[in-house]
Amino acid sequence: MATSKVPGEPTQTGTAVLETATSAIQGFGPINKIHQHLCAFHFYGYDMTRQVESHHFCAHQNEEMRQCLIYDSPEPHARLIGLEYIVSENLFLTLPDNEKPLWHSHEYEVKSGVLFMPGVPGPIQRQDLDKVAKTYGKTIHFWQVDKGDAFPLGLPQIMMALTRDGQLQDNLAKDVEKRFNVSFDAERENRAYMKGPEHGIHHLANGGGEGIKTVLRETDCKPVESVPRVFV
C-alpha cells in the first residue's frame, strides 16, 4: 500500500472509524459529480522549466464549464495541489481583457496527445477531447511539489499549459508514457482531425505571450467599522 508523502502521524484507527461513520451519513454532492480523470502537464506561469504532472478529476457545471481538482498522482494518498476551471470559447470571449491572460488554451495539449484520460480506450476519450481542444482553462497550483515542499508553502501561482513542440521535458514525457502505457506520438496521429477554437487561439490567452507570477504586497485592511450597519 502506498504511504503518504506528507509529514505527520499515520491515521489512527479511531479516526478511520469516524470517517467510515460520517461517510455513511453525509452526502458528498460536489465530489460525487466528478466523472473524469485527465492527465496533463502544467508549468509555472513565470518559469517553463518547472513542469508538473497534473491529474485532473473533473465535473461538469454545464455543457460549457467544468471544474477540476488537481492531484500530483491518481493514487489514494495523492496530494491536492491545485484546481482548474475549463470553459468554452464562447464563455472565454465574454471575460474582461485583463482576465484573459490568466487562461490558457488546450488545442496543442489535446492534438499533441499529451493530454489524455488514463485507462480509457482511445476512441472513447477522443469523443470528449475533441471538445476540450476548443476550450480554455484557468489553473492555480497551491503546492509546489516539484520543489519537494512537504506542505503547500508560499503563494498560489497561475499555471500555464504547453502550446507547441519542444516545450515538454523529454524525461517527464517518457516517464508518463511508460507508467500509463500510452504513446503521445500515436495519439497525435489519431487526433489530427481535431480543431481548436473556432476563432483561433485568442492573442491575450496563455499570458498574452508574457510570464505571469503571483506576488504579495502590503495593503490597508478595511476595518469592520467601515461596513454599514444595515440591520442595527
Image (cartoon, grey):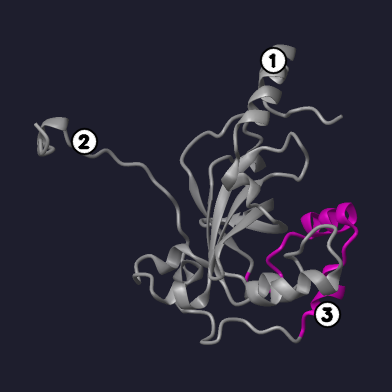
Quarter of the picture holding the C terminus = top left
Query: In this rendering, would 110 be left or right of 154?
Result: right
199 displayed left or right of 172: left
Give the alpha-carbon distance from disc 3 to disc 1, as whole Å. Answer: 47 Å
Q: Which residue is mark 2?
A: 221
Residue at the farthest front position:
25
Q: Residues within 10 Å of mark 2 (few under 14, many from 20)?
A: few
Query: Label 1, label 2: how many angstroms apart (C-alpha)?
Result: 37 Å
Magenta run includes residue 183: yes
The question of residue 174 being in magenta is answered with yes
Q: Where residue 19 sits: x, y (%)?
A: 67, 24
Which residue sits at x=21%, y=35%?
221
Q: Main structural element of the magenta stretch: helix, strand or loop?
A: helix
Relative to the observer, which residue lies in front, 65 or 151?
65
Q: Position of residue 169 (x, y in %)?
A: 74, 59
Between the residue at mark 3 and the residue at mark 2, the CA separation in whole angstroms equals: 54 Å
Give the extent of the magenta segment: 163-192
Residue 65: image x %, image y %?
Answer: 53, 65
Amino acid of disc 1: Glu
Considering the numbered disc 3 on the image, is that residue within a helix, a strand or a loop?
helix
Residue on which disc 1 sits? 9
Q: Earlier in the sequence, mark 3 or mark 2?
A: 3
- From the viewer's perspective, is residue 220 above or below residue 48? above
Label 3 belongs to which residue? 190
